[in-house]
Structures are given as structure tokens and as C-alpha cells.
């Protein structure tokens, strides 16, 4: 597989928080990565989903960012 057609967008509505992001990671992102089996995972991480960002209208806490990073590290350990 050369990676063609493997981009996944997970649009979440304004006000999405921990539950929505964790659900998306568990039910969409993790299975997609497991199916694709990448050789490398690159992360470009911003914090505009933070509850403290006045523009994004998202509701993530530091613990949510930790969950996302831990999930990605686990996948990287498994496949990369």
C-alpha cells in the first residue's frame, strides 16, 4: 500500500470535548492506523482544541492531550 486514499478527516462540532475526541481516537483513528500499519507516524500538534483557546470552541484539557499522545505512542511502538 502506497498510502493513496488513506487520509482521514474527523470533523467535530464546536464544543466537542473529551468524550468526542476519545471516541474518535478509539473508534476511527486507532482502527485506521492498525489497518494501514504505517512505518512512521508524524505528529504536528497544536493546542487550538484546548478549552483555553478562545477561537476554537473545543474543550480539551491537558489530560485529553495526554490521552491522544499516549494513544499515538502506543501505535508507534506497535508499528514503527
Image: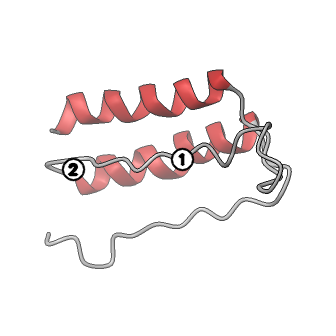
Question: What colouring does the structure picture have?
Answer: secondary structure
Residue 14 x %, y %: 83, 57
Mark 2 element type: loop
Circle 1 residues within 10 Å: few <14, some 14–19, many ≥20: few
Q: Write the residue at 63% across / 37% down.
A: 22
Residue 24 x %, y %: 60, 48
Front residue (pair 68, 48): 48
Q: Write the residue at 31% across / 46% down.
A: 34
Residue 12 x %, y %: 72, 59
**Residue lying farthest to the front in this orientation:** 54
Circle 2 residues within 10 Å: few <14, some 14–19, many ≥20: some
Q: Which quadrant does the C terminus fall into?
A: top left
The answer to whether 7 is drawn above or below residue 21 in the figure is below
Residue 56 x %, y %: 77, 55
Residue corresponding to mark 1: 46
Mark-to-mark CA distance, 2 and 1: 24 Å
Which one is closest to the eye, mark 2 or mark 1?
A: 1
**Occupied quadrant, residue 47:** top right
Work out whether mark 2 precedes mark 1 in sequence or the reverse, and give the earlier one. 2
Mark 1 element type: loop
Residue corresponding to mark 2: 37
Front residue (pair 19, 35): 19
Front residue (pair 66, 48): 48
Amino acid at each position: 500500500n502506497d498510502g493513496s486514499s488513506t487520509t482521514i478527516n474527523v470533523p467535530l462540532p464546536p464544543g466537542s470535548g473529551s468524550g468526542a475526541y476519545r471516541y474518535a481516537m478509539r473508534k476511527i483513528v486507532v482502527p485506521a492506523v492498525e489497518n494501514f500499519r504505517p512505518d512512521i507516524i508524524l505528529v504536528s500538534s497544536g493546542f487550538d482544541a484546548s478549552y483555553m483557546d478562545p477561537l476554537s470552541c473545543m474543550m480539551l484539557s491537558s489530560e485529553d492531550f495526554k490521552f491522544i499522545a499516549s494513544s499515538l505512542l502506543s501505535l508507534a511502538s506497535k508499528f514503527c
